[in-house]
Amino acid sequence: MKKIRTVKEILKSYKVVDGAGVHINRVFGYNEIPKFDPFLLLDDFRNDLPENYRKGFPWHPHRGIETITYMLEGSVEHKDSIGNKGVLNAGDVQWMTAGSGIIHQEMPKGNDEGKMYGFQLWANLPASHKMIAPVYQEFKSSLIPEITMYNGTKIKMICGQINDLKGPVKEIVINPEFLDITVPQNSEYIHQTKVGHNVFAYVIGGACQFESEEQTLYENKTLALFDDGEYISIKTKETGVRFLLISGKPIKETVAWGGPIVMNTDEELNLAFEEIENGNFIKNQST
């Protein structure tokens, strides 16, 4: 008999100000290491007030991690120090593998109503991949497939596979799954998961239960971190639910984290900041 994943921890996002003054709901971060391994941070930057996000994230470095940006409304203009640039619009995703180092900026812009909705996830890289050349995988919403399941559940496939359908983001070392799932009202959806991977769900609309015999209602801006197992159960009542489902293979290595740099040792971390000061931080050109 297959084992259901039960919820082992519940988190509510909390307000922080980051970048040059961007108001964010932080779901998890430094204080939660290593519970979400291989993931480091999840920020919910849904915002209706331009004064709370327009200053953005001016030039800053990254090394040793991947940053994943998923937009729902509005846009983010981005460019880096070695010539890459573009705009993420509603429904688009960017999976940036910073690797050995990149210096970039991200400047959010709202839609006509002032809404700027999206999420940024940080994924760690194992020691074997921390100094690889930076890589961008960027996909417009039209390239992100959506599958409709047996009960009307709709799943946007950013990364991962269901049946024969695969998300466009591929060849990521932590073998992740990143899905945007909408389950209709008065319904149940069963989702298979990889045993040994860390799995969490972050509710972004409506409400649901995540365990078949447990009555806790998970609502907007609530995260459920699951125990190990082979599947999760999502039950809805009158509202239906929309949530991000994210999973990955744990790296199980030491973490030395300083702001936008994440390495394995303090020595590597200190070297990265020395190289930023000395002007020799960038090692490879991106692709």
Image (cartoon, grey):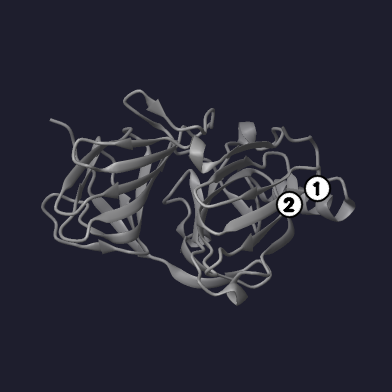
Residue located beneath label 1 in the image: 81
What residue do we see at 20% from left, 56% from top?
209
Specify few, some or many for label 1: CA neighbours under 10 Å numbering under 14, 14-19, or 20 or more. Answer: some
**Relative to residue 36, is residue 142 depicted above or below?**
above
Mark number displayed over residue 104: 2
**Farthest top residue in view:** 164
Mark 2 touches mark 1? (CB < 8 Å)? yes
**Farthest front residue in view:** 112
The residue tagged with tag 1: helix, strand or loop?
A: loop
What residue do we see at 32% from left, 54% from top?
242
Task: Decide if residue 275 is on the left or right side of residue 123.
Answer: right
Residue 98 rendering spot, x and y as whole percentages: 67, 42
**Relative to residue 95, is residue 167 depicted above or below?**
above
Residue 243 rendering spot, x and y as whole percentages: 34, 52
**Relative to residue 275, is residue 149 depicted above or below?**
above
The residue tagged with tag 2: helix, strand or loop?
A: strand
**Relative to residue 51, is residue 78 depicted above or below?**
above
What residue do we see at 36% from left, 49% from top?
200
Specify few, some or many for label 2: CA neighbours under 10 Å numbering under 14, 14-19, or 20 or more. Answer: some
| Nearer to us in this view, 42 or 238 | 238
Q: Which quarter shows the N terminus?
A: top left
Residue 161 rendering spot, x and y as whole percentages: 38, 29
